[in-house]
Image (tube, rainbow, N blue to C red):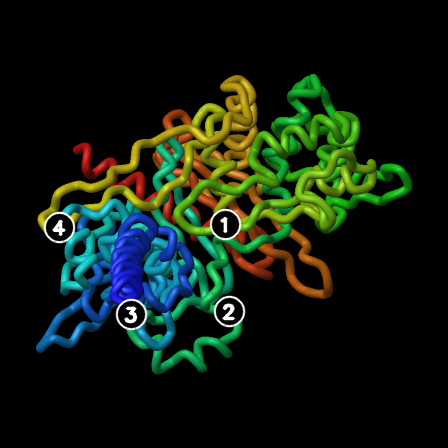
């Protein structure tokens, strides 16, 4: 009898010890893994005893912060709609989204927790989370937001030298301060305010010609060769048309990109061949997961496969000038633009600059690193030269800035159906020493030069004049 009771006691004790180790294991060793799911309610419920850290821009502007008054915690977003849906929200009722969700392990002091935070976590004591400093510049964010306000679309600005995200706007947006009360109205609002349009996929139109350029150059295209554009071209029985059937006459590569000649890129794209075109797409990251703090949809070339092994001439011709079945996000187009600006190297994009604990000790600081090298420096220089021509003599002229040489490309993408084209504009500046690269998309905005170029120009001019002022 005593032996049986002793065995029961030993078994009970071992169970308690096992449960204790399990508790520590899951609360400490595997806690970050548990928090990976933004919908995890446990992450939000932790905020009953954890003061979520603040989110700041690169200049110290408060973007999100928790106010504590009489033991009541309120998450506030001082900049309102200008930062949504990028920053997102964190509420007990709705959970979390955006950076609030994907940086939750930092903000709640779970990821790489200090010894003090670990003890507080194990014993479920009240504590303070970590502050996150972003690479974002609220001044540029506000300019982009004001430019896009009232439209549906996105604007992304990146420092091509290090991959820092300087601005990331999606419209329409919402006020993170009133998510719980306004949930139904926000959900029903046209344009999907909760969707981050910077990461959604769109037909790129003529902006993709900068990528096709890489294929043409690798196939041995002589950029000085002349091509006669009559307004249409027939390729394998398929009629390729210029916008408004405009005949560009005799053009070389620079003029073809500057004037956005569809038939030039379709004709030479087919001559280069599908193998070279598909390899160029792969080198720019098509079909790949983009390494970033937030999830970005993979860009694709066809409906069946992101990057197929073969492509017939008809689809290749249409894809070469950004139509066919090609889909790409504004965020990815900004990276492609940044790669051309950075002598052919695309840096890993990032929006988190550093993380600090409540005592302002730096727990994490991002170090710039390359992601892809889709172009040689010589190829990047040739494409840049054509983009400069596009601003000085072509369709990208509306994005020009007095005192700064801009390199840019427009796009008017046909999304299908009887609707207006999507308006694209990609650009970087100064052309001889690029410090900012942007991609702007306005859904059904018409022409890139008309709808998107003014927004891109305002972002770039603000950034460059701000830097000029800092250096004076």
Q: Are marks 3 and 2 in contact (CB under 8 Å)?
A: no
Alpha carbon distance from label 4 to label 3: 20 Å
In this rendering, the label closer to the viewer, 2 or 4: 4
Left or right of 113: which side holds 241?
Answer: right
Labels 2 and 1: the sequence-earlier one: 2
Q: Nearer the viewer, residue 358 or 140?
A: 358
Q: Residues within 10 Å of mark 3 (few under 14, many from 20)?
A: some
Find the distance from the CA under tag 2 to the CA under tag 4. Answer: 42 Å
Residue named by callout 1? 296
Residue carrying label 3: 45
Of the 4 image quadrants, the one containing the N terminus is bottom left
The answer to whether residue 449 is seen in the rendering is no
Residue at the spot of label 2: 192
Q: Earlier in the sequence, mark 4 or mark 3?
A: 3
Q: Earlier in the sequence, mark 3 or mark 1?
A: 3
| Residue at image coords 27%, 42% | 353
User: Tag 4 or tag 2, which sits nearer the N-term?
Assistant: 4
**Residue 90 place in picture, x, y as percent:** 32, 67
Q: x, y percentage for residue 63? A: 25, 59
**Residue 36 percent across, percent down from the top left:** 39, 54
Whole-angstrom CA distance, mark 4 to mark 1, is: 35 Å
**Residue at (41, 67) in percent of width and height:** 173
- At 44% from the left and 59% from the top, the residue drawn is 170
Query: Mark 4 or 1 closer to N-term?
Result: 4
**Label 1 near label 4: C-beta < 8 Å?**
no
Task: Indicate the secondary structure of the residue bearing disc 2.
Answer: loop
Helix, strand or loop at label 1? It is loop
Mark 4 = which residue?
Answer: 116
Q: Secondary structure at mark 4?
A: helix
Tell me the SS state at disc 3: helix
Of marks 2 and 1, the one in the foreground: 1
């Amino acid at each position: 009898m005593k032996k049986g009771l002793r065995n029961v006691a030993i078994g009970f004790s071992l169970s308690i010890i096992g449960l204790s180790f399990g508790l520590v294991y899951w609360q400490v060793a595997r806690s970050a893994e548990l928090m990976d799911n933004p919908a995890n309610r446990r992450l939000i419920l932790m905020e009953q005893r954890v003061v979520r850290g603040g989110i700041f821009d690169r200049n110290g502007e408060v973007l999100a912060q928790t106010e504590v008054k009489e033991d009541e915690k309120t998450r506030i977003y001082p900049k309102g709609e200008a930062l949504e849906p990028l920053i997102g929200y964190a509420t007990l009722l709705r959970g979390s989204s955006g950076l609030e969700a994907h940086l939750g392990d930092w903000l709640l002091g779970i990821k790489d927790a200090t010894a003090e935070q670990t003890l507080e976590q194990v014993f479920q004591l009240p504590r303070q989370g970590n502050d996150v400093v972003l690479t974002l510049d609220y001044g540029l964010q506000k300019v982009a937001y004001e430019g896009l306000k009232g439209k549906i679309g996105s604007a992304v600005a990146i420092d091509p030298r290090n991959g820092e995200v300087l601005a990331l706007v999606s419209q329409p947006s919402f006020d993170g301060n009133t998510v719980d009360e306004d949930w139904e109205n926000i959900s029903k609002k046209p344009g999907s305010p909760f969707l981050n349009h910077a990461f959604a996929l769109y037909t790129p139109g003529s902006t993709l010609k900068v990528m096709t350029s890489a294929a043409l150059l690798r196939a041995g295209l002589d950029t000085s060769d002349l091509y006669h554009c009559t307004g249409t071209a027939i390729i394998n029985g398929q009629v390729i048309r210029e916008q408004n059937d405009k005949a560009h006459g005799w053009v070389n590569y620079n003029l073809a990109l500057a004037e956005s000649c569809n038939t030039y890129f379709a004709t030479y794209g087919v001559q280069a061949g599908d193998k070279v075109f598909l390899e160029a797409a792969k080198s720019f990251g098509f079909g790949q997961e983009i390494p970033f703090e937030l999830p970005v949809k993979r860009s694709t070339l066809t409906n069946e496969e992101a990057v197929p092994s073969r492509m017939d001439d008809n689809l290749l011709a249409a894809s070469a000038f950004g139509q066919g079945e090609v889909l790409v996000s504004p965020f990815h187009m900004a990276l492609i633009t940044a790669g051309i600006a950075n002598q052919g190297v695309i840096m890993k994009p990032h929006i988190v600059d550093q993380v600090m604990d409540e005592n302002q000790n730096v727990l994490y600081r991002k170090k710039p690193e390359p992601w892809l090298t889709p172009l040689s420096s010589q190829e990047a220089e040739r494409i840049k030269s054509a983009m400069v021509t596009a601003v000085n003599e072509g369709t990208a002229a509306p994005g020009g800035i007095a005192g700064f040489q801009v390199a840019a490309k427009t796009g008017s993408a046909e999304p299908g159906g009887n609707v207006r084209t999507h308006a694209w504009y990609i650009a970087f500046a100064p052309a001889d020493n690029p410090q900012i690269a942007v991609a702007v998309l306005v859904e059904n905005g018409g022409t890139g030069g008309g709808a998107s170029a003014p927004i891109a120009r305002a972002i770039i001019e603000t950034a460059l004049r701000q830097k000029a002022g800092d250096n004076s």
